[in-house]
Amino acid sequence: PSPPPAPAPPSLPPSVLSTLRGAMDLTARSASGGSGDASTAAEAADLWDSILSLPPSSSSSSSSSNSATAAAVTSPPPQRPPLLPDGILAVSYALRGAALSRAGRDADAVASYSSVLDDQSLRRLLAADSLRDASTGRAGALQRLMRYREAEEAFRECADASMTMAMEMSEGGKGEATGGEKAASSAADGSIYRAATCALRTFDDDHNGEGAGEGAARRRGMEMLEDHARRRGWVLDDLDDWDGEVAGMTGALRWLSATGTDRKHDDEMTLALLRRGSRGGKGSPLYSWLYELAYASAEHQTDLPPSSTPLSFLKEERSDGESFLRLASVNQSPFDEAHLIHLDDKVLLHRLLRNSSLRADHLDGCRDDSAVHFFPEGFVLPDDASSFREYVSSSGSGALHDDDDDHDDGKAAWILKKRSGYGGHGCRVVTTAQALRHCARMENDPPVKSKEKEESVLCQRLVGDPPLLVDGRKFSMRVYVVYFPPARFGFDDGEDDDDDGHGARVFLSSEGLAKLALAPYDASATPGEGGDADAVFLSDAYMTNSGRGKGGGSEDADADVAATSQLTFGQLRDELAASGAARDWDGIWSDVEEAVRETVQRYRALVSAAAAPCASERQPPRTPAIPKIMGFDFLLAGSASDDNNNNSSAAVRTFLLEVNRFPGLEPRSDEDAAVKRRVVGEAWRLARRLAGLDEMGEKEDMWLKPLDIS
């Protein structure tokens, strides 16, 4: 007998349908205009939460515990909303994940994506393109969370799934590839490129004489790229069919992995791959640059031209915006040092600057802990729970200031920082009592995967009581630091030739940006015990990230201005002078230089110590001279004027808040653009000079000044 007909899906109330349409519209709007609108994305996420019967994401971002978030990363919501058919439920979780990612809530996005991707009954209901988007969305969120191992595996799974889909379409089609097959193949190319990028940002113990894990990571990346090329049917004799980015990375890894024992390495094919990566379509200035370096160091004659695609941005006084953005995107290069995570990860940065056991093991020659006065006191929870309690009981709970008679008065005293996050996301301002309760929760519910401590939290003293203000608002100084790791372009020929490479170099930009908080500073404001309005106000008053609030082409002009409210350093100097600040700019800048120097010295000592066990008689591989532009964020604390006739050096103190490995270089305003364009342009001019390709003009005025880190 025929099976009974399937029951009809329940009809949805008009109010639910209306909310669904609104959530889908907001999600689509948040994705427009490149980076999208974080505020619109957060609004969309709240609508999806109401549809899925979840607590609003916006309130959880401000007042929920980080341990609760850690649990949510690995487990879906306990039960499904009773009204929604499974098909709509699957799409809702996927679109909620997309909205959360655009709002900067990557940990919650991973949980939302996992709710559909790890539930086979829901996963199979997603259309092919929606499934692909959700899978790559989860992998991208893991990458931004700096969980590179998991992201690598997730991207490889995305590439495999897309390749399988493309092959099935190819077998069922006739002749020329269909649009769906091309889309699936292109998605596979992009996923394998990002998988290899994540592989290069990890490091293992490696004892083959190729640096601190660089050799193992490069081999893993090369293997997955070569395997992908075989599956795509690409051959080295015909590079026109290759995806440009995959070809460029393959050529780069071939060139970088060549050692002194491989002098007959196929330079011609390596150059051809790099040239393919540098031209046409998504051609990258990164591979144009590596092509030029590889050409200059080639061991054999070649018929290829000496320069593939000139870095036009460097040759024009004012280039178009697209050229600048393409060059700025090289700062996301897969070939920066994997150990830079020790600066980017807030917990690892704290350990680098504060942890005495790390200093004793790896940082011989660096100053002792007491000298790191520029980095606020903090504790990694739950590891340092006992030390945190002892500190609170012995010294009180207030924000950092010169006298130490702080007390627990219910005011903001600490900031809880997740390991990763941008735009102020993952940070929460709390009182001492709230910090202690949070500490207790983390001890009783330890984070998942405790071996790697992905979800450890930095509990850090708030800086400034009071902070220095501009127009009644807190501000931070974004100082651009250009770092060149030790570079080798050729092979050791036994001669003392500086053109073969250089040691680590650091340059400080004398111009930068002062980023103002959205809301006025109010020293009497308190975080409260979960009031969302209070939490949002405190977040807007304490966080000084230029991407907060509306932006990205919002129709609200005032909100756009607030989201990009910042000053150049020249304007900041004028503001401080007009306010009667007790310390001159030269004194402040001297503190900045000291903090950057000490931080980079400690970082270089750590890298050297990690590489020491890998030393051997083998010739080290090449390393490229790619400028790494980082953002060091500082906050000034103290009185605006020296009313008590104190020493001026104590009246205004300079604190390092964090280091951004991938600072936003996209212009947000005319003044913002002027600073970023010049920093990027000068960084690349320095790269060419360090590589011996250009000479330094004797009277050239540069913002980027060398900083001695010896």
Image (spheres, rainbow, N blue to C red):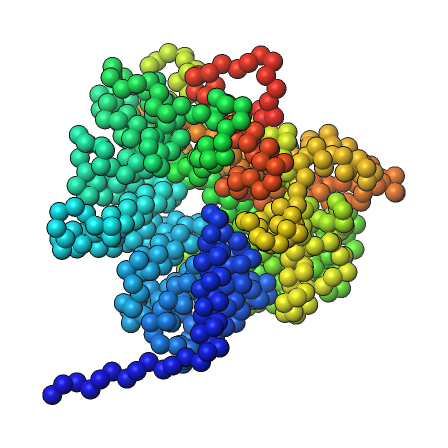
Q: Is there any visible trace of residue 74 in the rendered image?
A: no
The N terminus lies in which quarter of the figure?
Answer: bottom left
Relative vertical location of residue 645 with respect to residue 161 in this rendering, above or below: above
Which one is in front, 333 or 103?
Answer: 103
- Give left or right: position of 588 versus 692: right
Location of residue 54 in the rendering, given as x and y in whole percent from the top left corner: 49, 72
Query: Which residue is depicted at the point 30% across and 82% down?
Result: 8
Q: Residue at x 74, y 61 (%)?
A: 525
Q: Residue 380 at x, y = what percent?
A: 55, 55
Asked whether 158 or 651 is in front, the reply is 158
Q: Is residue 209 above or below residue 536?
A: above
Left or right position of 67 against 404: left
Compared to 375, does 296 lie above or below?
above
Location of residue 307 (image quadrant): top left
Q: Nearer the viewer, residue 121 or 342?
A: 121
Q: How many marks?
A: 0
Looking at the figure, which quarter contains the C terminus? top right
Q: Is residue 34 visible?
A: yes
The image position of residue 411, as x and y in percent, is 73, 62
Of all residues, the one furthest to the right in this rendering is: 644
Q: Nearer the viewer, residue 227 or 215?
A: 227
Residue 84, compared with residue 66, is above or below; it is below
Q: Position of residue 271 (x, y in %)?
A: 28, 25
Whether residue 191 sits left or right of residue 378 in the image: it is left
The residue sitting at 61% across, 19% down in the picture is 701
Identity of the residue drawn at 67% across and 36% down: 568
